[in-house]
Image: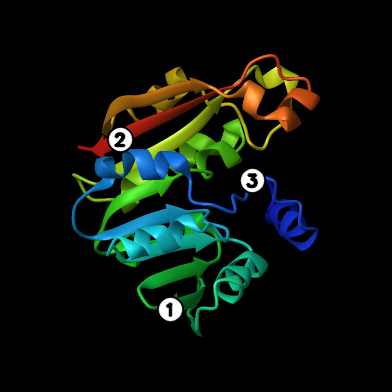
């Protein structure tokens, strides 16, 4: 999936993946991420979840490809922002929230120094199958042992709808992360009746699964 795809989505405001409120699974399963240290939010967009995480006393580090999304996060939330740049990213900072604007795969471990938790609501499921193994491998290279991840994924018949969001079944989650992480399924729920837009696209089933991953 090329960067132009996501730039176009943000420019045309085709952002059905964006949630205007704090994700209920983050509220319910926050204890899975409890601890000290920073929280990393990959492919963060303009998610309000970052504000909630900051309000819990944790510093937040995000990565987002779209400059429009990053600027919108600070503008819409009335946050003063300092912007700098290096050879890989534009860097936006405001009161304990730092967002790297650029390619996730350009991150180095030093960029995530101090991170002890990851919140992945819309990152893994945004990636097509051919990118997901590289994403999981890169995560392993970036994070320290003991880092905890709250991962939210969809399961549906992939042939019934083109992603994103893509279907990522539990078997694939275990294949991607099992070598490097302890994996616990925290929650499984059928959400098709709550998501008419997906029904309209022809889905016959849709589950949401919440996982806790702990890096070895």
Tell me if mark 2 has few (under 14), some (14-19) or many (20+) residues whose alpha carbon lies within 10 angstroms of its own: many
- 77 vs 199: above or below: below
Residue 181: image tag: none
Q: Camera-side residue: 181 or 36?
A: 36
Which corner quadrant of the image does residue 149 belong to? Answer: top left
**Relative horizontal placement of residue 7, taking residue 117 as reference (left or right):** right
Picture coordinates of residue 80 (x, y %)? 50, 84
Please give the residue where the numbered disc 2 appears in the rendered image.
213
**Relative horizontal placement of residue 180, taking residue 43 as reference (left or right):** left
Asked if marks 2 and 3 touch (Cβ < 8 Å), the reply is no
| Lower sequence index among marks 1 and 2 | 1
Tell me if mark 3 has few (under 14), some (14-19) or many (20+) residues whose alpha carbon lies within 10 angstroms of its own: few
* Residue occupying image coordinates x 62% and y 31%: 166
Please give the residue where the numbered disc 3 appears in the rendered image.
17
Residue 94: image tag: 1
Picture coordinates of residue 41 (x, y %)? 43, 54
Q: Nearer the viewer, mark 1 or mark 2?
A: 1
Secondary-structure class at tag 3? loop
Q: Camera-side residue: 8 or 28?
A: 28
Q: Is residue 107 visible?
A: no
Q: Camera-side residue: 131 or 83?
A: 83
Tell me if mark 1 has few (under 14), some (14-19) or many (20+) residues whose alpha carbon lies within 10 angstroms of its own: few
* Residue occupying image coordinates x 29% and y 26%: 184
Label 2, label 3: how many angstroms apart (C-alpha)?
23 Å
Q: Nearer the viewer, mark 2 or mark 3?
A: 3
| Lower sequence index among marks 2 and 3 | 3
Which quadrant of the figure contains the C terminus? top left
View extreme (top): residue: 204
Picture coordinates of residue 126 (x, y %)? 59, 41
* Residue occupying image coordinates x 48% and y 51%: 22
Label 1, label 3: how many angstroms apart (C-alpha)?
24 Å
């Amino acid at each position: 999936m090329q960067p132009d795809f996501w730039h176009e989505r943000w420019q045309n405001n085709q952002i059905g993946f964006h949630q205007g409120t704090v994700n209920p699974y983050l509220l319910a399963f926050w204890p899975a991420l409890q601890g000290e240290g920073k929280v990393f939010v990959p492919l963060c967009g303009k998610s309000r979840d970052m504000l909630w995480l900051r309000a819990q006393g944790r510093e937040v580090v995000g990565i987002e490809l779209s400059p429009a999304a990053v600027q919108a996060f600070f503008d819409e939330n009335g946050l003063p922002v300092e912007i700098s740049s290096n050879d890989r990213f534009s860097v936006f900072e405001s009161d304990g929230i730092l967002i790297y604007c650029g390619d996730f795969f350009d991150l180095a471990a030093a960029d995530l120094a101090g991170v002890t938790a990851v919140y992945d609501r819309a990152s893994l499921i945004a990636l097509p199958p051919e990118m997901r193994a590289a994403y999981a491998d890169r995560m392993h290279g970036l994070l320290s042992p003991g880092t905890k991840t709250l991962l939210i994924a969809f399961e549906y018949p992939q042939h019934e709808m083109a992603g994103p969001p893509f279907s990522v079944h539990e078997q694939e989650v275990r294949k991607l992360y099992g070598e490097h992480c302890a994996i616990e399924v925290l929650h499984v729920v059928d959400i098709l009746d709550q998501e008419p837009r997906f029904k309209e696209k022809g889905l016959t089933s849709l589950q949401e699964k919440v996982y806790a991953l702990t890096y070895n």
